[in-house]
């Protein structure tokens, strides 16, 4: 059977759409319970001293910088991000490269059928890495990533439910329904096509070049998850801008490396590059509009 990425797109899009419906049903019951953001002891102490230790002045609350969960200093936070991103990227790379080595080894069972002219183990590994990178990251850093919640409901965050909604955003800010369509219906299936083509046509040639491209690709996934955690999870606008810049830069580098291995695979990365460029521009606009 000839390899066709169109079939990949159809299969992955159907699975993604099914996943959206299932997760929306689960999140509907979860979102029914409202959460209330607590004020840090340091902030309470400051407000109590300025209001006779009993009353909290509403004007003082308005002057508290957005992103109150950003308690770490910049070096500490970025050290954590760097460490978890490296570990997550290594885990994702290990999944992909192990599947390639196993499929090429003599111990791979001959009775396992290929799918779209690709070994089943490589296809499953690619699917896990593309669609399940946030869950791998959650295992690495010991907590659930905010990526899934943000993709399905970008106006709802884990900390303050109204935090993202209350940020000053540009007039061209995409509506909420665009996010799940772009991430799960457009970006992820095309990434699966790119990764599958690169593994199919690239791993038999220059292995060093293939390993570098795979490492860059998994690093961009890890940095994307880190951005979701910093911006939507910790509600840090400034630091989220730094992380998404690195995320976008590594994405472009991985696309270039993949293109050098297989042009078709490189072209399949372009929808993700386009969407992340929009997300990066939106992040910068939010940063400058909410800067104090």
Image: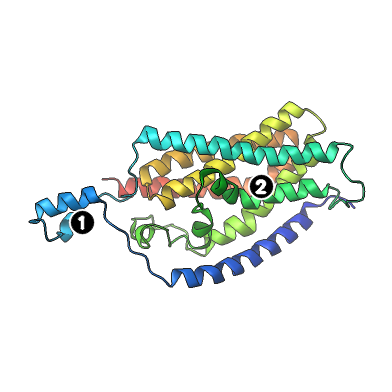
- Tag 1 or tag 2, which sits nearer the N-term? 1
Q: Secondary structure at mark 2?
A: helix
| Residue 225, horizontal then vertical, whole percent | 53, 46
The foreground one among 232 and 185 is 232
241 lies left or right of 251? left
The foreground one among 241 and 274 is 241
Q: Which residue is mark 2?
A: 129
106 lies left or right of 248? right
Q: Which residue is mark 1?
A: 61
**Is label 2 in contact with label 1 (beta carbons under 8 Å)?**
no
Residue sitting at 79 percent across and 47 percent down? Answer: 121
Query: Is residue 9 among what the camera can see?
Result: yes
Residue sitting at 65 percent across and 45 percent down? Answer: 269
The foreground one among 197 and 38 is 38
Q: Find residue 87 and report its image quarter.
A: top right
Q: Residues within 10 Å of mark 1 (few under 14, many from 20)?
A: few
């Amino acid at each position: 059977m000839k390899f066709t990425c169109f079939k990949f797109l159809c299969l992955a899009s159907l699975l993604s759409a099914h996943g959206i419906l299932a997760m929306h049903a689960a999140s509907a019951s979860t979102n029914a319970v409202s959460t209330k953001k607590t004020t840090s002891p340091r902030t309470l102490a400051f407000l109590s001293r300025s209001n006779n230790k009993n009353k909290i002045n509403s004007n003082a609350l308005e002057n508290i910088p957005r992103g109150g969960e950003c308690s770490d200093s910049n070096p500490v936070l970025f050290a954590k991000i760097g460490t978890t991103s490296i570990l997550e990227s290594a885990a994702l790379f290990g999944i992909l490269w192990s599947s390639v080595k196993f499929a090429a080894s003599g111990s791979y069972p001959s009775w396992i059928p290929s799918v779209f002219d690709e070994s089943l183990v490589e296809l499953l590994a690619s699917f896990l890495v593309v669609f399940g990178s946030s869950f791998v990251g959650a295992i690495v850093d010991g907590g659930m990533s905010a990526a899934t919640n943000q993709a399905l409901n970008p106006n709802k965050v884990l900390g303050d439910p109204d935090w993202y909604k209350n940020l000053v955003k540009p007039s061209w800010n995409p509506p909420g329904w665009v996010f799940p369509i772009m991430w799960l219906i457009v970006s992820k299936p095309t990434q699966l096509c790119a990764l599958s083509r690169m593994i199919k046509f690239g791993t038999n040639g220059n292995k060093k070049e293939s390993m570098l491209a795979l490492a860059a690709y998994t690093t961009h996934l890890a940095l994307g998850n880190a951005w979701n955690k910093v911006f939507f999870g910790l509600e840090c606008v400034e630091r989220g801008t730094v992380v998404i810049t690195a995320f976008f830069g590594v994405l472009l580098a991985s696309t270039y490396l993949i293109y050098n291995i297989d042009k078709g695979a490189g072209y399949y990365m372009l929808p993700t590059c386009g969407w992340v460029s929009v997300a990066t521009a939106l992040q910068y606009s939010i940063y400058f509009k909410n800067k104090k």
